[in-house]
Amino acid sequence: MRLTTVTQMALPHGRVRSFVLAPTGPPGAARPVSFDQGRHVGEGDRPGSWMAIAARLPGPFEDEALAVAWAAVVARHGTLTTAFDRGSGAVTLHEVDLAVRGWVEHDAPPERATREVVREVLDDACTPFATPSHRLVVVEPDGDPQGCDQEDRRPVAVLAADHAHVDMWSLVVLVRDLLATLDDVAAGRPVGGGLAAVPSFAEHTAELAARPPAPGPVRRRWADVLEAEGGVMPLFPLPLGDVSVPRDEVVEVRDVLDTAGVGRLSEAASGAGVRMIALAVSALTRVTREVAGRPLRAVFPVHSRYDERWHDAVGWFITNAVLESADPDPRACRAAVKEAMELGSWPLGPILAPWGGMPQAPGMFAVSWLDTRRLPVRLDPGLATQYVSASIRTDGVMIWFVVNDEGLHLRCRYPDTPQARDSVGGWLDAVEEGLRGLAG
């Protein structure tokens, strides 16, 4: 499982096509909009709001077989048959009926990187208000590897959607379901018949909104962290230069530990009586204290698949918490992570209402942790899967730590200014060194 960005992803050169579904008839029933969806979609249509996963298909398929399989996957997941609108001013969500428009060929001349062609397709198709805001792209190799295994002739499927409809977990589900429906088509079975029915993300949104309001201690703890940052979400603790407007992004992808190193880090965590994430937070806390002289404070995305019935569903099952850690002792970091999980377990709208919603400011700092080995959906490593982020302009710092069967990796996005390159780059170097030191 490779963690990458669209500007760095590995794709063979070859024929590039995408399968298009289009709406038929007027919008259908209204569906609830989650707090995070409303915030994301409310920023308007823009390129780079999507996320994707790329994987090798087991072999060549007829156009009709792949079309039938993907259409069945779309119909299976409610969020993929909904679309956003803002005709009345407020962001709304409604069901849509989709019909097959067919395959579209995209010009991919030999002198151009395939990933640039794919990027253009997804930037155009997977925007917040597109109907639908997802797309299946297929690359059929022609023999020019462009960084890929030149002997691998299997086509590459790129499954992408606007972030309002998917998270990283969802992308793995989509690949799993596409492979299953392709098998069904090949075997002449009912397509998708072997996959259990799943609830829609809109049902999750309604359930979360119906929960009781957060208790007083949770609201006060949110207020403490925000006020410590001047009334905004946590900021990166070192200078970033002028980020009053978004800048071109710098994306660094680092392989921090190999499989053996992750094993050693896991053993060290067990010896300290904590999970591996607590040791990672310990390294972040220590580095932040040493280089910035302040506690670690960061936006901390947490998943909201609080019940097993959501494990095979597709949607944006991610909400934000805040993480504050002042003591690098692993047990204190374990407590800080536990507190962050609790802070992210309540509907955010009422919590953040005193600040007019999520009080985001230039320089916002976020840290995400995902151990793909713990997901209930596992993909065959032979699929050469790649998690792919879009390319955007940014004014903040976002770090993803991803653990998989190949090791511990980090991807960091930050604004391209001289100060940010120096500050964030040095901070990342120290974090990487700290994690390797903990792994022994």
Image (spheres, grey):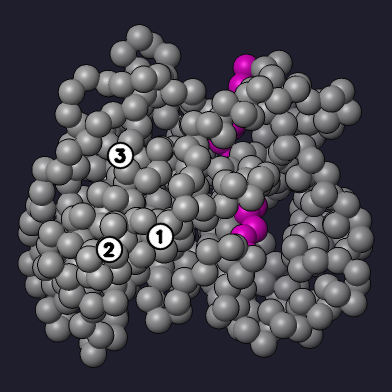
Q: Tell me whether the residue at label 3 lies in contact with that at label 2, contact meaning CB atoms closer than 8 angstroms.
A: no
Query: Mark 3 highlights which residue?
Result: 133
Helix, strand or loop at label 1? It is loop
> CA–CA distance between discs 3 and 1?
27 Å
- Indicate whether residue 300 is drawn in magenta: no
Left or right of residue 296: residue 2: left
Examine the rendered structure and indicate whether residue 138 appears above or below residue 338.
Answer: below
How many numbered marks have been drawn onto this rendered protein structure? 3
Kind of residue indicated by mark 2: Arg
Q: Tell me whether the residue at label 2 lies in contact with that at label 1, contact meaning CB atoms closer than 8 angstroms.
A: yes
Query: Mark 1 highlights which residue?
Result: 194
Whichever of labels 3 and 1 marks the residue nearer the N terminus, that label is: 3
> CA–CA distance between discs 3 and 2?
29 Å
Q: Quadrant of residue 23?
A: top left
- Between 97 and 348, the residue placed more toward the observer is 97
Helix, strand or loop at label 3? It is loop
- Indicate whether residue 364 is drawn in magenta: yes
Q: Quadrant of residue 288?
A: bottom right
Q: Where residue 29 sits: x, y (%)?
A: 36, 20
Whichever of labels 2 and 1 marks the residue nearer the N terminus, that label is: 2
Query: Mark 2 highlights which residue?
Result: 189
Helix, strand or loop at label 2? It is loop
Examine the rendered structure and indicate whether residue 366 appears above or below residue 95.
Answer: below
Between tags 3 and 2, which lies in front?
2
Residue pictured at 52% horizontal, 69% vertical: 378
Q: Residues within 10 Å of mark 2 (few under 14, many from 20)?
A: few
Residue pictured at 25% horizontal, 49% vertical: 71
Left or right of residue 370: residue 139: left
Whichever of labels 3 and 2 marks the residue nearer the N terminus, that label is: 3
